[in-house]
Amino acid sequence: MRPLDGITVVTLEHAIAAPFCTRQLADLGARVIKVERPGVGDFARAYDERVKGMASHFVWTNRSKESLTLDVKHDEADNILHRLLEQADVLVQNLAPGAAARLGLSWDALKERYPRLIVCDISGYGADGPYRDKKAYDLLIQSESGFLSITGTPDDPAKAGCSIADIAAGMYAYTNILAALIQRGKTGKGCSIDVSMLESMVEWMSYPLYYAYDGATPPPRAGAAHATIYPYGPFPAGDGKTVMLGLQNEREWVAFCDKVLGQPALATDERFCSNSRRNAARAELRAIIVEVFSSLSGEQVIARLDEAQIANAHLNDMHDLWDHPQLKARERWVPVGTPAGPVPAPLPAGAVNAWSARMDPIPALGQHTEAILGSLGYDGEAIARLRQEKAI
């Protein structure tokens, strides 16, 4: 038995934030009914064709769901949606600002009729405030939240390589829904959850926000290096490989000088004898490190770092990640069905011994429409009529 077996989630979702949230609910056993536009579906289905003709974003965020196609503006749509909500525990939506309210799917419109329903709205900026109606995409929120100001090189800001703002919002929607389900178990009442991408990213700005407290200078952009701790970042080895390493304290600095650089006297050099001094003299220290590493392969550098118990990592690309020995050893890849055949998927983070994550197929557009409508009382003739009217 999984934690969310028996929980039904109805979701009007697209792109990443809401689908990532609801996929994780499905991982825990929830039945997730994904309402999609007939003929088109979630527009993330068309982002690319990299996974056997399917979009990489969609494959990532939509396994274990049921796809119901429905034109939400059709006359019959309101009846279908309410029949679904009668048996639902959670409603999730990340439609355009105000769209859910216009469809009668806001918390205020539903709370009397469905007192146990949990309604989760995911948006760029939240349900009120002067930015409420602004369009919000992942890169725009990375910019608005200050993330870009501290990410990149000194000359140029850089976005995160993944949809970090969408992921942040999806994670907070997921955790808030889990908390709301626990609360409902105590009170018997549902609630409203308002998750904004901006506020999710502000939480994730963490130490840079406080580092710049009360008008102080923000941390500089430092590429792949740490902005305020040194040495902490990428260094080239003699074979063209790049090694990531990070020092956290003075004990590690002493070990690094002795066992990795082979220059124990460097540990007490006045230029480098504290993190603040090393940070100020980055260029000088980097030149010393690069000179030592130039006669070593990447694996030899990592061997020295491991021996000295200095944290390190390979600078892997996506192909390296598919073949990562740690993931293979822990059997973290499992096959998941898709309309184009099985593809590997990583198990959800967190190995739990009390249940197995649900890893069911990624649905074709509208794959479950007839079965869902049949369960709501629609017979074959009614379903055929709805299909003829392009309602489904």
Image (cartoon, grey):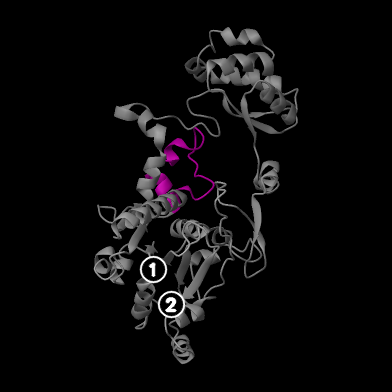
Q: Residue at horizontal 68%, vertical 19%?
A: 260
In the image, is 216 to the left or to the right of 8?
left
Mark 2 or 1 closer to N-term? 2
Residue 305 belongs to the span the image colors magenta? no
Q: Which of marks 2 and 1 is in front?
A: 1
The amino acid on which the numbered mark 1 sits, given as a three-letter code, is: Ala
Secondary structure under badge 2?
Answer: loop
Question: Left of 352 or right of it: where is 76?
Answer: left
How far across and down, in percent of the image, does residue 152 sit? 50, 37
Pointer 1: what residue?
Answer: 88
Q: 220 and 20: which one is in front?
A: 20
Q: Residue at x 42, y 53 (%)?
A: 174
Residue visible at 49% across and 44% down in the picture: 159
Q: Name the residue under label 2.
A: 70
Q: What stretch is highlighted in magenta?
A: 138-165
As helix, strand or loop, the secondary structure at mark 1 comes to loop
Q: Residues within 10 Å of mark 1 (few under 14, many from 20)?
A: many
Task: Tally the marks.
Answer: 2
Could you tell me if residue 336 is visible in this image? yes
Under mark 2, the amino acid is Leu
Q: Are marks 2 and 1 in contact (CB under 8 Å)?
A: no
Q: Where is residue 199 in the image (x, y as percent from the top left)?
A: 35, 46
Rendered view: 145 above or below 390: above
Which is nearer the eye, 77 or 148? Answer: 77
Residue 107, quarter of the rendered image:
bottom left
Residue 367, image quadrant: bottom right
